[in-house]
Structures are given as C-alpha cells and as structure tokens.
Amino acid sequence: MAYKSHKITLRPTDAQKVWFSQQCGYARFAYNAALADFKDGLKADDFRSFIDLNNRFNQAKKAFDWTKGMDQRAALYAVRNLSEGIQRWKDKLNGFPKFKKRGSRKSYTTDEQSVRVEGKRIKLPKIGWIRMFQELRFQGEIIRVTISRTAHRWFVSIIVDAGTPNTPRDMRGLPVIGVDVGINSLATLDNGTQYENPRPLKRYERKLKREQRKLSRKVFLSNNWYKQKRRVERLHYRIACIRNDAHHKTTTEIVNCARAVGIETLKVTNLLKNQNLAKALSDSALGNFLEKLKTKAEVLGIPIVQAPQFFASSKTCSDCGEKKKDLTLADRQYQCDSCGFIEDRDVNAAINLRNLAVGQTEN
Ligand SMILES: [Zn+2]
C-alpha cells in the first residue's frame, strides 16, 4: 500500500466555481459548529469524541435547509479534521483549535464512491465532471480528493492508493540512463538526447520588472494597488507553471524509457558566488527537477543511483577514466588529454553517471 498524491489545476466553469465556494463554506460551517459544540461540552464536563461531534452535527444541520443540497462528505471531513486538532491539543502538541474565519484558506475534502477520473477530467459528487489541466499521474484506487483555492485558481489534490506495483513494467529491454542536469540544457542523457531549459524567469524578467515598478508607484493598499498586485502574482504563477510543465514532461519521458537512472548530487554553493549564474540556477530549479525525477522513478519501481557529492561527473573521461583538472564551465567539449576521446561536455558527464548506475544496479 503506497499513497500517492497529485495536485492538479482545475478548469471549472463559473457555476462549478460557485459550487466549490459553497462546499468550502459548508466545510467551514460544519467545523465551526462542531467546535462550538465541543466547547459547550467542555463547559458541561461532557467530553465529545469525533463520533459524538459528528452525530450531533448531523442532527443540528437539519435546522438548516440549505445544507441538504451540499456534499455531506465535506462536513464529515471538516469535523474529522477538527477532531484531529482536538486530539493534538489534548496531547499538548497544539493550541486549542480556533474558529475558521470567512477569509481563511478555502478547501474541502470528499471521498464518495462516485469520484472518478478519466483522462483530463474528474467526476465529483453532485456537481459532475470538472475539466483538469493534466491527467492524473498515478493509477489505483482514489482514496480521497481535496479541492482548494490558491490565489485565483482552483486545484484538486487526488490521493491514490498506488498499491504495491501489481503490474510491474517489463523493463528488460530498456537501457540504464545517465542524466546530467544543467543551465544550458535542462537535462542531457548519455545517449545524446537533450531537453531544453525553458528559463521562464529570463523570458519574463523585463515584463516582471515593469509590472513590479508599476506596483511600487500605486498608492499602497488602494484598489489599483491590489489590481496591480494580482497582475504581478499571476506573472509569478505563470513563470512557475512553465518551469513545472517542462520538469514534468522531461522527467516522465526519462523514467518511461529507463530500467535504472543515474543522477548527480547538485553542488551549487560554489556556483552561487557568480551572480548571473546564481540567477540562472534558481530559474532552472534543478533541485526540484531531480526531486520530481526521483519521485516518479520510485512510483515505477525504477532504481535511482545518485552519485556521491564529490563524484567528478564532468571532469572524468567516460572512456578511460582519466580526470581533467583544467575543465572550465566555458568548455562545451570534453577532450581527453590521455586517450583523445572527444564528446559533448554534458553527454560525457551523463555517460559517467550511467556507468555509475550500471555498476550499482547490475551484478
Ligand atoms: Zn580518456
């Protein structure tokens, strides 16, 4: 049993957005009602467990006609969430639960049998099919889903029981792949395949600066300031999306055609001294990229071999093993002084990482 979670941006219609808001409101209502009930119980010296709180809420809600049309699981999960908060308070891990205010983060959880995912859409209780921007990455039984809102977007987090991989892929025919990550190209494979680095911040840098300058000229907290602030936030969000998309596409392609993967351990500290390089590095988010690669490999049951920190993947000749001392970042070609081997710098590094992975996964 392995629970995996995938958060996907939704593409709801206006009516669906209203429904989501209502369910979030219902969850908050249930949470606050149960919390008030619990406090009353404390005063009356009558401890109420989760089951009590939930039963009492189910009775109390009958006085509110509008709750009938709602997704009842949203309330159940809200009360359960409160109970967990109460338990943490009793265990002295947390303060006493607080009431949820109107402006607090919007979310609700549901798990009805009717939840289904087909391609880029998800079926939710009562409201039906909602379009998603992506397909669900994992296969298996859907355990529960949480709908939430961040900035101006609605998301769904789907928790799937991916199980023990019951249909292991036949990977015998697939190669072991070495992956070198970098700024010039996001990923280079030992077979020479290169994936472009989108560097979205670089692309949007001027626009972002312009919009930020505009923001600084607005009257703080005025309507126009808020409007402009949203514009800046949306731009940041778009930048993150472009980067994220590229990372997902590339990592999926790599794990789908490998039996094992060799990667490096990032050593960025000495590169961060160079300001241009530091900017490019943060724009590439290579650490995130490697994390995604590891997660996906783990789901598919593919071994990932991460080179030790001082493994010289770039400086070592992948043909004869000789180490080059004078390789600089500007050298795009690796040329071995010892055996005369010539290869693209990144491909040479990827071959070294592959060889390391081969050595550790096949005996
Ligand atoms: Zn050599």
Image (cartoon, rainbow, N blue to C red):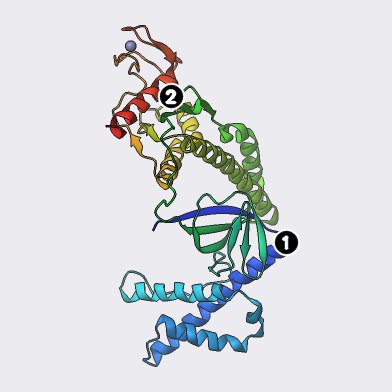
Where on the picture, by quarter, is residue 342? Answer: top left
Residue 11, x across and y down, in percent: 67, 54
Question: Given this view, does label 1 or label 2 mark the residue nearer the observer?
Answer: 2
Q: Which one is earlier in the sequence, the residue at label 1 or at label 2?
A: 1
Q: Which residue is mark 2?
A: 190
In terms of secondary structure, where does tag 1 sit? helix
Q: Which residue is mark 1?
A: 14
Observer-nearest residue: 324 or 191?
191
Q: Quadrant of ligand 1?
A: top left
Q: CA distance from mark 1 to mark 2?
A: 48 Å
Q: Is residue 340 visible?
A: yes
Where on the picture, by quarter, is residue 87? Answer: bottom left
Q: Amino acid at mark 1?
A: Asp
Q: Residues within 10 Å of mark 2 (few under 14, many from 20)?
A: many
Residue 121, x across and y down, in percent: 64, 55
Residue 362, x across and y down, in percent: 30, 32
The quarter of the picture where the C terminus appears is: top left
Marking on residue 285: none
Observer-nearest residue: 360 or 217?
360
